[in-house]
Amino acid sequence: MSVETATLKNGKTLQFNSDMIGDGAMKEVYFTTDRKKVVCFFKDPQAGSDRLRVQRLDFILGKYNPTLPRDAGGAASSAGDAAFYSNLFCWPTDIVTQPRFGIVTATYPNNFFFETGPDFIKGKEKNGVRFLGRRNRQLLEKLAPRELGTWINYFKLCITMTRAVARLHLAGLSHSDLSPNNVLVDPVGGSSIVIDIDSLVVPGLFPPDVLGTKGYIAPEVLSTLPLKFDDPKRQHPSARTDEHALAVLIYQYLLLRHPLDGRRIPPGNTAEEQDALQYGSQAIFCEHPTDDSNRVEEPNSVPNTCLGPLLPDLFKRAFVDGLHQPHRRPSANEWLKALIKTWDLLTPCANAQCPQKWHVFDAQKRQCPFCGTVARQPVPVLRLRYEAKPGQWLADGQLVVYDKLYLMKWHAFARLFPGPETDRTPQGYFAWHEGQWLLINQNLTSLTTSAGNRVPPGQAVALTHGSQIRLSQEPNGRIVEVQLQ
């Protein structure tokens, strides 16, 4: 292995190892000598002469870059905002002009490489495909069981993945190839990172370079693929097609199956024709409410209705209403809000041997949908309310309590969303103590019981059925109504 030098567009140089570590459809990848960055050379020898491609990369590295503050030429509102999104994207940092045209990006963080397992897995990047599908998971469970994580971490990585996509769409960008190949995941820590940023689509300015990946390409793109590229009826990758791919990924990570894969086999003459129909013009949701022709036949599969009151509605909009009508699909921001609201409904399973460990609490059934175990003690469900106008308190979500759960500011105050720079200081925590549930106040200055008594920081209030606790007397402070289920 020899050391070579890359010249950057800004005139600086970078040394990289000559041994190629990755070979994709469009680029070849090499480590820098310190292995902190990678140099990605485009295979197309004319790439550097493509004015539109160069301009796209300039915009991606600058004005569209959420990992760079505005005062440094980027799109982030502050240094804190930039740091937050730096953890969600592997964003390009430089353009390479010599010896070939390419880009430089940071090396993926260590948690996105397998730490355990045999040689053909250990040290490899955590491509999401390895965690999806029952066969892949069963193989990984045999080879590297510690890498599988638990269900709550898949839920968490769905939130981080959706945050990243929502941020792209907010800037008017689309990824165009969202798939497990381009969203690395870490189920051990519950994180994700979006990669292959250099081909972002800007409508009306930078067209898509790729169609997407099988199983994640939107039906309208597949259905119009035979048309000429400039035919006005042909559909191209966009934010709408990202919304389809995002919904597929969320469904897969939470339910471990593809939403369009069921028992139905489309009438194509070849496997390629069948795929084009299955994921294109004849795509049918495997949980379609009125058409059961594509039902899942896997044993022990759970329905999407086990995911609480919000997500099933979005899945219906994505895979029934919006499957062939893109304008009816939920936006990435809608998915983000629903995922965060549903996160507040998660509870640990009472069965220590449960394969998933966590689930969305169902107050009527009180049991884990994955293993059937019923909760062994009363579960407090806090009905959150906010004051819409003086004296009028409206429902504003729920919070399912479990031991050592933190109460955060966005629980205590309405109109506060857990975003990049939201204060994450715990306001209190819940505990199961001597046969009763308690809320221990840590930082709430005007926590008040149903009887009107103040509970200062360091003191606790019991969660009794039917009681109403005012979390704060400050503007937007919420009231919670306690129900023991």
Image (tube, grey):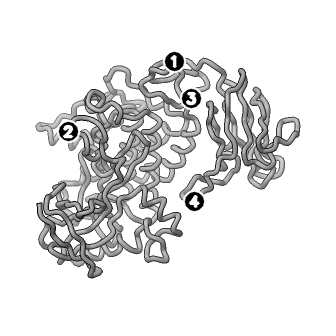
Question: Which mark is drawn over residue 119?
Answer: 2
Q: Which residue is mark 4?
A: 421
Among the 4 quarters of the image, the one containing residue 199? bottom left
Of mark 3 and mark 1, the one earlier in the sequence is 3
Residue at 67%, 38% (x, y): give it.
Answer: 429
Front tag of 3 and 1:
1
Marks 2 and 1, how far apart at CA: 38 Å
Above or below 408: residue 312:
above
User: Of the residues shown, which amino acid type is indicated by label 3?
Assistant: Phe
Q: Say which residue label 3 marks.
A: 361
Secondary structure at badge 3 equals loop
Mark 3 vs 2, N-terminal side: 2
- Residue that label 1 marks: 373
Which label's residue is closer to the chain start, 1 or 4? 1
N-term mark: 4 or 3: 3
Q: How far separated are the C-alphas under marks 2 and 4? A: 40 Å
Above or below residue 451? Residue 174 is below
Count of numbered circles on the image: 4
Callout in the foreground (1, 4):
4
Q: Secondary structure at mark 2?
A: loop
Which one is nearer the viewer's eye here, 225 or 115? 115
- Disc number lying in front (3 or 2): 2
Crowdedness near tag 4: few (<14), some (14–19) or many (≥20) residues, C-alpha within 10 Å: few
